[in-house]
């Protein structure tokens, strides 16, 4: 579908035929949890293109849907209701409709539910033209009159306005780090001038001809491979495998430049929105303008403009979280999945899909290349390289001669932390000494612990009672910054009670184990002069907060960073030379298929933060199990041996990627009904060669948000097509009211 058609409706002044003529019967797919499309009749005076957005009656409501194809003919024509209106929105491109169909069929979710992800912008379809938005430029009076006070805050706004083509008040305020009131004050004073902002102004045109950095020989070779893949066109997957700091971003920027030269669109998927600030700056440095970001924190107006900008081909480059995959790109030429191994790409709620895998599907349907970038690729992707399905380009060295950090392990059994005046301690003497000397030499250090809050467990010293969530089988996690004990699975939060709910003893609670807040407390006591910042999803409420912390670290206003996996990825802090992993064993336990692999990837990523250019980095890893293969791989800087063993184990066990898994989670508020449905599923389970059903068993999170949960696991050989099997199976079981069966094809979570 050419994206020059900016409306679903045929232009009456042109002779171009629409796909469906006036008065035709069409099937309209609604973005609701329904699998099929419903038939409607087009108005007598307007035809539409396939993919047109139309308003149709449904019962007594009006709903926006998409013209999916010709009418099914299931209803007599006399009973088919007319389309109410044809929206002036570009039609959903054919490739996107096929993608929706594909994802629905693969994940076993209704097509309407998947379509909803492609339409997650209510206001685009509200029928009203978007209200005109005002942006602010520098006013005529560039030099403030004496009567106007120019505070530091106001000066920042004026500087930001000078750098931009005109931004709405809220964005200008954010760019300057002030409130929107400051912007409006300047406008009132005549120092800023309001200009109508057409939504196109939001998207600058990235310039692929701007010179990039001079690439090293291995970078240039990798870039040449990618650009020639882009030039050839057609589907293909390339793994861009390079150690942290090898310049993967600069290399895939070259491929993006190639796509932009062709006049096509490009999409970059990133696992964490927090990562986008630095990424956006680098993109702007290379291409002269920022790309369009897409994530859940985006305001409604920005969402609407971006969706439309993408649909009309004006937004050329989008960088976003997994949901960006469902944007209506009419002319996508390249997808890059950065940090492809990240489990954050797997969506667990609603439609369970893996954005990396679906990016490959989207690229195949769109017949263009896809680049998967990682320092620590997933075993799935490495196996696809080995099978010859994916091509691999390798960057073995850090850019600019920087060496990889040296990793050493601290055996916590031999060198346990020494108790301090503040209470229990989590940092061993060698780690304390290293942090001290790093800070003393004017460099920065980072302590990593993948656990939010102050303490993961609070128990009564009198009777041993553990404070747990009433809605979930989970302990309450103490957060001192908010003064609350929180459940990390639901919204439940309480203040610490005085009396134990079990034995009524008063003031006998003890915090057990560390979270980042507790490590920060110890660090503050041990390194009294250090400027400490905690970096977790609790302290960073959104991209703006992340951006400002990153800038503070870059400006060396922070000496010691303490945080969770949110700080593990993608950041480059030139002065950061020491990384301490507080508990490397965390995450290695449990029955998760990928626990070891994931821990190695995460710790590898964290280690990669240490040292750049002329400052070699050191990584100290605290462990109670220093000979564990994951720890050994990390210390040796050689994950190959680990991957070889892990691959062999999965091959023998026929686990992914050498077999298929599908998780079935049966849940409901009444345990008896849940058990009954789970038993019914077990009774009707598919049998046959290469097919195995395990369970039902209580899920590790047997109780979650007030629902009892049982799990079944379908395990098959690779040759088995699981979708038809599952469809037939699920059709046989009719769970009682209130019981839900969630299907998770290729599960990543086994909770
Ligand atoms: P990776 O994503 O592989 O960890 P990056 O692409 O982020 O690596 O690059 C690491 C750092 O090295 C960045 O600060 C980047 O700007 C810089 N860099 C990489 N390649 C070059 C180059 N050819 N010239 C100049 N700087 C480079
Ligand atoms: Zn809970």
Image: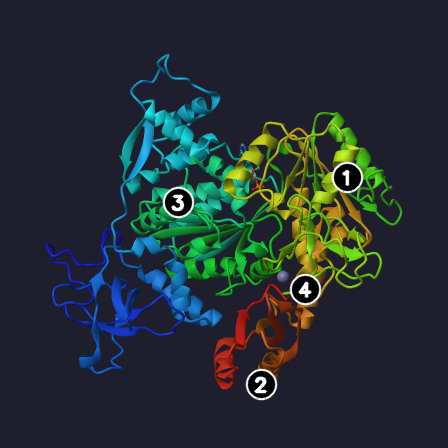
Helix, strand or loop status at disc 1: helix
- The colouring scheme, among rainbow, by chain, secondary structure or one colour, is rainbow
Q: Which residue is mark 4?
A: 592
Tell me the quarter of the picture where residue 98 sits: bottom left
Residue 543 visible in rendering:
yes
Q: Earlier in the sequence, mark 1 or mark 3?
A: 3
Helix, strand or loop status at disc 4: loop
| Real-space Cα separation, disc 1 to disc 2, in angstroms | 53 Å
Name the residue rendered at 12%, 64% in the picture: 45
Q: Earlier in the sequence, mark 1 or mark 2?
A: 1
Q: Which residue is mark 1?
A: 522
Mark 1, Cα crowd under 10 Å, few <14 / some 14-19 / many 20+, is many
| Real-space Cα separation, disc 4 to disc 2, in angstroms | 26 Å
Q: Closest to the observer: 369 or 558?
A: 558
Image position of 261 with respect to 391: above or below: above
Q: Earlier in the sequence, mark 1 or mark 4?
A: 1
Ligand 1 lies under 8 Å from the Cβ of mark 3? no
Q: Are marks 1 and 2 in contact (CB under 8 Å)?
A: no
Tag in front: 2 or 3: 2
Q: Closest to the observer: 2 or 622?
A: 622
């Amino acid at each position: 579908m050419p994206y020059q058609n900016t409306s679903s409706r045929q232009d009456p002044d042109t002779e171009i035929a629409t796909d469906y003529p006036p008065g035709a019967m069409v099937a309209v797919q609604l973005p609701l949890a329904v699998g099929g499309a419903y038939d409607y009749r087009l108005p007598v005076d307007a035809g539409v293109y396939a993919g047109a957005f139309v308003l149709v009656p449904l019962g007594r409501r009006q709903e926006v849907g998409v013209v999916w194809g010709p009418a099914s003919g299931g209803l007599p024509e006399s009973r088919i209701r007319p389309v109410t209106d044809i929206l002036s929105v570009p039609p959903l491109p054919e490739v996107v409709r096929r993608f929706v169909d594909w994802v629905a069929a693969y994940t076993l979710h209704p097509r309407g539910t998947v379509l909803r992800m492609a339409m997650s912008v209510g206001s685009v379809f509200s029928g009203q033209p978007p209200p005109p938005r005002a942006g602010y430029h520098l006013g005529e009076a560039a030099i403030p009159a004496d009567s106007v006070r120019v505070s530091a805050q106001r000066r920042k706004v004026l500087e930001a306005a000078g750098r931009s083509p005109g931004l709405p008040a809220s964005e200008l305020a954010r760019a300057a780090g002030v409130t929107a009131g400051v912007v409006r004050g300047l406008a009132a004073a005549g120092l800023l001038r309001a200009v109508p902002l057409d939504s196109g102004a939001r998207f600058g045109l990235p310039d692929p001809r701007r010179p990039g950095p001079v690439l090293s020989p291995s970078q240039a070779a990798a870039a040449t491979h990618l650009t020639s893949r882009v030039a050839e066109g057609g589907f293909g997957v390339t793994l861009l495998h390079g150690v942290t700091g090898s310049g993967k971003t600069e290399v895939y920027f070259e491929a993006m430049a190639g796509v932009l030269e062709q006049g096509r669109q490009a999409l970059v998927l990133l696992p964490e929105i927090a990562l986008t600030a630095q990424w956006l700056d680098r993109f702007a440095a290379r291409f002269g303008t920022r790309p369009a970001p897409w994530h859940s924190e985006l305001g409604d107006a920005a969402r609407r403009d971006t969706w439309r900008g993408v649909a009309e081909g004006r937004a050329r480059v989008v960088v976003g979280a997994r949901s960006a995959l469902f944007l209506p790109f009419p002319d996508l030429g390249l997808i890059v999945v950065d940090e492809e191994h990240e489990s954050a790409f797997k969506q667990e709620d609603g439609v369970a899909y893996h954005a990396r895998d679906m990016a490959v599907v989207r690229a195949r349907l769109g017949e263009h290349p896809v680049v998967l970038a990682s320092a620590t690729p997933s075993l799935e992707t490495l196996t696809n390289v080995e099978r010859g399905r994916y091509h691999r380009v390798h960057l073995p060295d850090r850019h600019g001669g920087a060496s990889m950090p040296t990793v050493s392990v601290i055996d916590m059994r031999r060198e346990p932390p020494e108790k301090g005046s503040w209470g229990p301690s989590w940092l061993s003497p060698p780690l304390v000494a290293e942090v001290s000397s790093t800070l003393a030499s004017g460099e920065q250090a980072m302590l990593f612990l993948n656990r939010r809050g102050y303490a993961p467990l609070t128990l009564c010293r009198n009777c041993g009672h553990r404070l747990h969530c009433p809605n979930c089988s989970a302990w309450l996690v103490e957060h001192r910054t908010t003064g609350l004990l929180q459940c990390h699975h639901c919204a439940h939060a309480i203040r610490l009670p005085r009396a134990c709910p079990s034995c009524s003893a008063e003031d006998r609670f003890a915090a057990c184990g560390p979270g980042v807040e507790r490590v920060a407390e110890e660090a503050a006591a041990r390194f009294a002069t250090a400027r400490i910042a905690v970096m977790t999803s609790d302290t960073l409420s959104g991209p703006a907060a992340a951006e400002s912390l990153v800038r503070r670290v870059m400006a060396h206003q922070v000496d010691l960073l303490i945080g969770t996996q949110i700080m593990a990825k993608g950041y480059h802090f030139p002065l950061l030379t020491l990384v301490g992993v507080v508990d490397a064993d965390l995450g290695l336990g449990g029955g998760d298929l990928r626990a070891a692999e994931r821990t190695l990837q995460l710790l590898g990523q964290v280690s990669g933060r240490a040292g750049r250019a002329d400052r070699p980095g050191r990584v100290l890893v605290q462990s109670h199990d220093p000979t564990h293969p994951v720890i050994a791989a990390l210390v040796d800087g050689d994950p190959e041996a680990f991957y070889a063993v892990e691959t062999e184990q999965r091959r023998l066990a026929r686990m992914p990627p050498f077999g298929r898994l599908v998780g079935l989670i049966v849940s409901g508020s009444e345990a008896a009904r849940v058990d009954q449905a789970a038993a019914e599923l077990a009774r009707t389970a598919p049998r046959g060669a290469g097919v195995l059903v395990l369970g039902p068993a209580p899920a590790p999170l047997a109780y979650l948000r007030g629902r009892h949960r049982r799990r079944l696991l379908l395990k098959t050989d690779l040759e088995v097509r699981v979708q038809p099997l599952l469809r037939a199976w699920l059709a046989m079981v009719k769970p009682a009211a209130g019981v839900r069966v969630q299907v998770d094809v290729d599960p990543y979570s086994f909770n």
